[in-house]
Amino acid sequence: MDKIVIDGGRRLSGRVAIAGAKNAALPILIATLVAPGEHRLNNVPQLVDVSSMLSLLGRVGCPSLVHGGAVRLDTSRVSFCEAPYDLVRKMRASVLALGPLLARCGEAHVSLPGGCAIGVRPIDQHLKGLERLGCRFELSGGYVHGHVDQLVGARIVLDFPTVTGTENILTAAVLAKGESVIENAAREPEIVDLVNFLRSLGAQIEGEGTSSIRVQGVQALAPKTPYSILPDRIEAGTYLVAGAITGGDVTVERVEPRDLEPAIEILRATGCVVDVGDTWVRVRRHGPVQPVDVTTRPHPGFPTDMQAQFMALLSMAKGRSVVTETIFENRFMHVPELNRLGADVSTDGNRAVVNGVDSMHGATVMATDLRASASLVLAGLAAEGRTEVLRLYHLDRGYERLVEKLQALGADVARVTDDLERLRSAPLAVTQNVG
Ligand code: EPZ
């Protein structure tokens, strides 16, 4: 098992180029199924989750070629309509196959994603919305089996602005007969990117980025031009916190600053200086971190995917901050690990009280989920001494070349495989081969 080893206490400075957004790439990749032909996608992040999604597409009969951030994907033929358990268990975003497979094939067999470290994460809203479009579902053998003869447009009111729920419904509605309206739709930038991609295929959609999205179904869709995935606001926010927590000076490039507004607002409230350009954001911190209360909300509120990272920063504040998590019921798994590094965080339900400490101290910590892992790396950058972060497979799902990017910013960080570690620590055995 790999681990990250950090010798903390260095101020990070420099510029880091941000990759394409994982949570835009995943729905867009699977949405290619609604448009038979050869798709060309650019700025696709090189992540384990993206590889998993391409494996899923390969399983249903759609081969792909990847060269750096460019992906060519041929969805001319779909020979299989299933997202199997062995893929879904690794990546719950496989549930996004429901809408496109139903729209393309009239059927879909998707392993139930099950819960994960951060919560139960049901898909009741996905199924309710797709049923409104004429789909029928039955659950058996740990799978959701969906069928539809003809998708028919409908008005759908979501109980919760679910991101992947909105995406599943959208990717079916584009080929439904007639008009659909999704009320209480998710407003995340990744939804807007998916709509822009679907529009590039010929879909007729309006209202993206608002809570009411209107879709005019069309007969057929086809790839016409290459599409470039929008920048990853969560990756960008993570590096901005890296600059802030180390008292450094970091600029994230190739970003959409508008998507970072909630994070920028909190960074400024902690006392950081944040400058904003057309495609870059710079953070500097000279004085102490000021405590700030943070509550996660659906976009355009403060994103839950940055809660753990900002909690690491607030752990160093001069005072008490309250962090409230309103999206997932169990997204404080990083708290006991942060406390092992010397933080002073206590939780009560969905509320965490963060009493800032003067310094944190290196330790060995365990990653539990993607963003919790990032939080521990950030705390390790600020902690005195050595921190080792285990279970890196979480990080590899969502962060492209994390160690190299941190090294380029001046961090003393390395990725170590256990074999090497074992060799390093094993006593040198000298054997003399007598001829
Ligand atoms: C997406 O997950 C993201 N994943 C998550 O990012 C992100 O944290 C989340 O949206 C919130 O922004 C992808 O886009 C691939 P939700 P999703 O449906 O769609 C409840 C990361 O770190 N809910 O908006 O699964 C659910 O239980 C990941 O990159 C229902 O009750 O999130 C949760 O409490 C983590 N019924 C809440 O809504 C449903 O049918 C938010 O879920 C659907 C959701």
Image: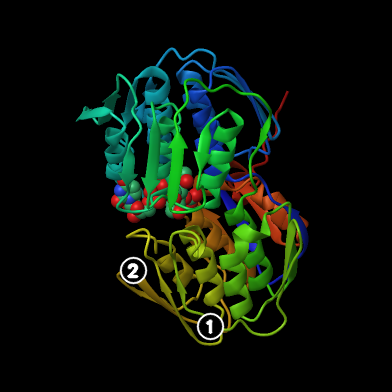
The image quadrant where one finds the C terminus is top right
Residue at left offset 57%, top offset 73%: 266
Vertical order, 21 against 100 (above or below) = below
Task: Answer whether residue 291 is visible to the viewer in this image.
Answer: yes
Identify which amino acid the numbered label 1 is placed on.
Pro
Q: Which numbered dot is residue 226?
A: none
Dot 2: element: loop
Give the residue at mark 2: 350
Q: Residues within 10 Å of mark 1 (few under 14, many from 20)?
A: many
In the rendered view, does 176 fall on the left or right side of 423?
left
Closer to us: 6 or 211:
211
Image position, residue 77 (x, y; %): 50, 12
Vertical order, 59 against 244 (above or below) = above
Image position, residue 234 (x, y; %): 57, 55
Q: Which numbered dot is residue 291?
A: 1
Q: Earlier in the sequence, mark 2 or mark 1?
A: 1
